[in-house]
Image: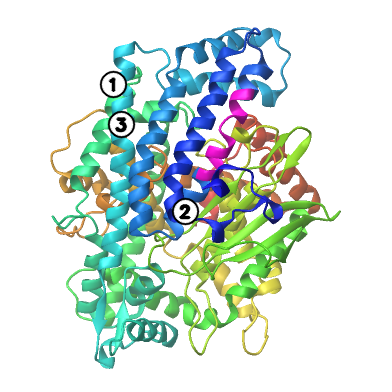
Amino acid sequence: MKILTTPFTTPYNSAPFSQININDFKPAFEETIAMARAEIDAIIENPAAPTFENTIVALDFSGEALDRLSNIFFNLNSAETSDELQKIAQEVSPLLTAFGNDITLNEALFQRVKSVHDQKSKLNLTPEQATLLDKKFKGFSRNGALLSDENKSKLREIDTELAKIKLVFGENVLAETNNYQLHITHEADLKGLPEGTKEMARALAQSKELEGWIFTLDFPSYLPFVTYIENRELRKEMALAAGKKGFQNNEYDNQENVKNIVRLRHKRAQLLGYASHSDFVLEERMAQNPAKVQSFLADLLDKAKPAAEREFTQLTAFAKELETIDSLEKWDGAYYAEKLKQKLFSLDDEILKPYFKLDNVLQGAFTVAEKLFGITFKEINNIDKYHEDVQTYEVQDTDGQWVALFYADFFPRKGKRNGAWMTSYKPQYIKNGINERPHVSIVCNFTPPTETKPSLLTFNEVTTLFHEFGHALHGMLANTTYPSLSGTSVYWDFVELPSQVLENWCYEPEALALFAKHYETGEILPQQYVDKIKESASFLEGMATLRQLSFGMLDMAYHAKAQEITNVKAFEKQAMEIAALYPDTPDNCMSTSFSHIFQGGYSSGYYSYKWAEVLDADAFAYFQEQGIFNKDVATRFKENVLSKGGTELPMELYKRFRGQEPKPEALLKRAGLL
């Protein structure tokens, strides 16, 4: 257990995965919570008058061992989980929630923080120090420090219950994903499917000692299936299985969990004096309040809906030209969209994939980062990995100074949740004059290599890699003093700017020339395909925008006002109706597997993807004006956005980079919605 509770003696102070015994986690949590408690007690019992240093800074640096342990444990629980880890998560989550409450509801600690906050105008603080002071004060006032003892107890109960239900929600989604497989034994049923996907499905069947092919709800298996399989009934079966996750009235059903999470969030917000959970959340966002978010979503809906309806009519007509179908259903969308894309642009993923070998794309992302921000990536093998698939890199700047550790984990497996994300094992901060550098990881579920081919990515996977790498750069290039303001610790509707802006380089010939090379011949992606990628970038963008807006609207419907939800499916249908294009599927429900808002941190925040698109389109327009590898613009972005974390208000940082507030025109133009 000592390995988890004392400073690591590993190279780069990296996580010692190989030395961790799973049974050590719970006692290690108990010990590091006790250590953190002692640090808090020392702040409270300090006989000296409260100052910025002895109270605010001391509080920000407290619990370092606990934070480090939590990062390791919960990252493993997402990327390499097991029944044992999930059981431990259920046991330690209430301990962590209780400890968090013990801090925010501690009257003596709050009084010290308040005492410093009351003197704020006289303290001559830097912008970063002023932000930290406000953040610490709000951390108390927004989380119950001003409540009566009776209401503090109620808040503790709510938080403990919420932590447990959110964990169960995520475990149910993972279980439903893992429990489904489509076993196909007749090759004729696979007509239309690319060879690489077929090979992957054959390998999966063989690993389970079965004949034929197995398909799962993991994205690299699911998406090609519904995009290419000609057999409509099989596409329907697969799509319905994906849409039923958590909605099957079985032991993994999430309907009550959805109701309870929403109910408890409303109850918590009202206990704290807010009209709704959204009011509580958005107070600490660029968008500020629910009315502004709803107006933002409605305005975009207004602009996107006519285009989306035209596209849907076009897609339906095209589908009916090809086959006799009554109406376009959800399981038809990806299939006919791909066919229409091929017809309009003579472009499909199977033509492009040979040019997007994963290793090349990753090196391309590294080269883009080097050209823009002056950092290099060198693969290393002297640190522990939690799985053999993980790749590890040392990041340096042009002076040879160490910048960060970077982990990359690309392929799906049992025990790894779906999707793609960036995370951190250790944040950046400055302590005792030493700039502690961050350990950052990206986790994806890309098409794995097969016996005959390396991992070849779809173009969507290419943009996903750049997206997560953009988040990683935000973490790796952090240069702040305090850990709670470092890297991606920014307002939630600002956090997607670095990730989304980096996706733009995937469409630029100058950037594609760096990495889009045929894996067998080394031929650079022909210009005609580059042109088609750019030309098709806004293909069916109206429909895609409407889909994202519908998710944002559903999120706000759940959280923007207190209500009793009797039927999750009926509630969802009503909330999304205004943005719906496809006919409803009665036995599918999105909410029961909507992990972003019911397990992740996106509740009342799903709109932020579109919000950040406005920022990213405006930011990239600036790069385009000056040259996409312009050093001055890149340096301004690095110094005012990537390195600054949450040290100042996001709009101030953005204006310092761009010289003005963002305008939505760049996004509407890029999406072809003007």
Using residue 586 as the reference point, say whether residue 47 is left or right of it.
right
Q: Nearer the viewer, mark 1 or mark 3?
A: 1
- Give the CA separation, mark 3 to mark 2: 36 Å
Residue 66 sits inside the magenta stretch: yes
Residue 292: where, in percent of width, then height? 42, 30
Up/down of 157 relative to 595, above or below: above
Q: How many numbered discs sit on the rendered protein?
A: 3
The residue lying at 57 percent from left, 37 percent from top is: 490
Residue 41: where, in percent of width, then height? 54, 19
Residue in the foreground of this view, choosing between 24 and 14: 24
Occupied quadrant, residue 379: bottom right
Residue 524 sits inside the magenta stretch: no
The residue lying at 59 percent from left, 12 percent from top is: 117
Q: Mark 1 or mark 3: name the one nearer the start of the chain.
A: 1
Range shown magenta: 58-69
Q: Residues within 10 Å of mark 2 (few under 14, many from 20)?
A: some
Instruction: Check residue 639 in the rendering and tell me which mark sits there, or answer none.
Output: none
Instruction: Check residue 154 in the rendering and tell me which mark sits there, or answer none.
Output: 1
Up/down of 636 relative to 49, above or below: below
Q: Nearer the viewer, mark 1 or mark 2?
A: 1
Main SS type for the magenta part? helix
Give the residue number, with chain letter if any, for mark 3.
265
- Give the CA separation, mark 1 to mark 3: 13 Å
Q: Residues within 10 Å of mark 3 (few under 14, many from 20)?
A: many
User: Mark 1: which secondary structure?
Assistant: helix
Residue in the foreground of this view, choosing between 349 and 543: 349
The residue lying at 37 percent from left, 60 percent from top is: 82
Give the residue number, with chain letter if any, for mark 2.
673
- Disc 2 marks a residue whose amino acid type is Leu
Q: Nearer the viewer, mark 3 or mark 2?
A: 3
